[in-house]
Amino acid sequence: MNILYDRNMTLGARLFPRLGRARAVDGRTLTRADLAGCDLLFVRSTCRLTRDLLEGTPVRFVGSGVAGTDHIDFAALRALGIRVATAPGCNAESVADYVVAALLALGERQGRDWAGATLGIVGVGHVGSIVKRFAEEALGMRTLCCDPPRQDDGDWCARDFVPFARVLEEADVITLHTPLNEDGPYRTRGLFAGAAVRRVKPGATLLNFARGPICDDALVATMVGAGLLADAAIDCWEGEPDYPAELAAVAALATPHVAGHAFEGRANGTLAVYHEACDFLGVEPGPSPRLPPAPTPTLTIDCAGLTDAQILRRAVRAACDIEGDTARFRAAYSDDPATRRARFDALRRDYPHRRLFPATKVRLIRPPATVAPKLRALGFPVVRARG
């Protein structure tokens, strides 16, 4: 059994050799010639899975270890008799952690906490559902949810969802978590673009941690520059690995599509498609590898004189440093497009080790009674220390 896997798949080198002769490749530059003799292929979203790539090759199973699927031509692969496995929701908590990190960083920048503010969540699936819970239980925000496919399916949980226009009009922060749909009744390409965004609440903040083409990046840059948007946090860009310098320069937080890159998020994606491949081959999966410790396994915070928002900020930044990610992204900028693209991929490939919030235990000295429940709502194990 000959196997190719994207070298950026966390745990790939430990899992895929269990199934046969496995070789790591660069998924973004994969060609038909590379697939000669390949039976199983494992990739991430940087590899476009199309008829042109796969027709006439021996590949019969493809595993895409990411949540998004807009890089996959499912109809073509079905017609070729290729089984396709994906990893829906694999990095949902990682992205939700990143949203909280962004909100707390932006709140400090704007001189406010978000208690009582309105968060508009567009796309309330794996990620959006966790964001809703974190925002309400830890940050004290009111949420407005928008997800037309769920509403139209009669999902009882969506009975209180609102139209996108209302989110634009009322939300202090708009966070996008939809898939990229190119057409049809639920088209999301260009969702935040054109005449629609004229309704946006003046001074609102925009977060795009979904897909770049959902937003008109040039328009967002113009709105931030004109003060129509107070701030923007952008992790996904139209044209990746290239990206628009104008928006990267004015966004308060700008990162290279790494919201889902917590170790668990990437490992979950690899494990999901590994298990699907085991099922395809009719073999028993081996044990899951042990995860490495968090960079900050234990954090002690003296809470004297700090607000709840400041305490949350310290805990979250220790686990998920979105400002550090932004600084590295800005430092890697180049006027040369080829260099800029290469550095974008390098930032993703060499992303610093990050774990989800539950991997960092928080010890509190002199805490207010209100803060521990908020930290626990985010998943942090909390203990009270003497001090």
Image (cartoon, rainbow, N blue to C red):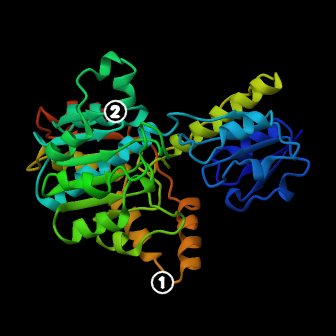
Residue 352 appears at what percent x and percent y? 50, 58
Q: Position of residue 151 (x, y in %)?
A: 33, 24
Answer whether residue 129 is visible to the viewer in this image.
yes
Q: Nearer the viewer, residue 267 or 172?
A: 172
**Which residue is denoted by mark 2 in the rendering?**
147
- Closer to us: 9 or 176: 176
What residue is pinned by disc 1?
A: 335
User: Disc 2 and disc 1: Cα gap in Å?
Assistant: 38 Å
| Type of amino acid under label 1 | Asp
Q: Nearer the viewer, residue 216 or 24?
A: 216
Q: Residue at x 62, y 41 (%)?
A: 65
Query: Does dot 2 land on a helix, a strand or a loop?
Result: loop
Question: Pointer 2 and pointer 1: residues touching (CB < 8 Å)?
Answer: no
Q: Name the secondary structure under disc 1.
A: loop
Instruction: Determine whether 369 is above or below 283 in the image.
Output: below
Kindly indicate the quadrant of the structure image that contains residue 224: bottom left
> Residue 313's spot in the image, x, y percent?
24, 50
Q: How many neighbours does mark 1 have within 10 angstroms: few (below 14), some (14-19), or many (20 or more)?
A: few
Residue 302 appears in the picture as rendered:
no
Where residue 259 appears, as percent x and y from the top left, is 43, 50
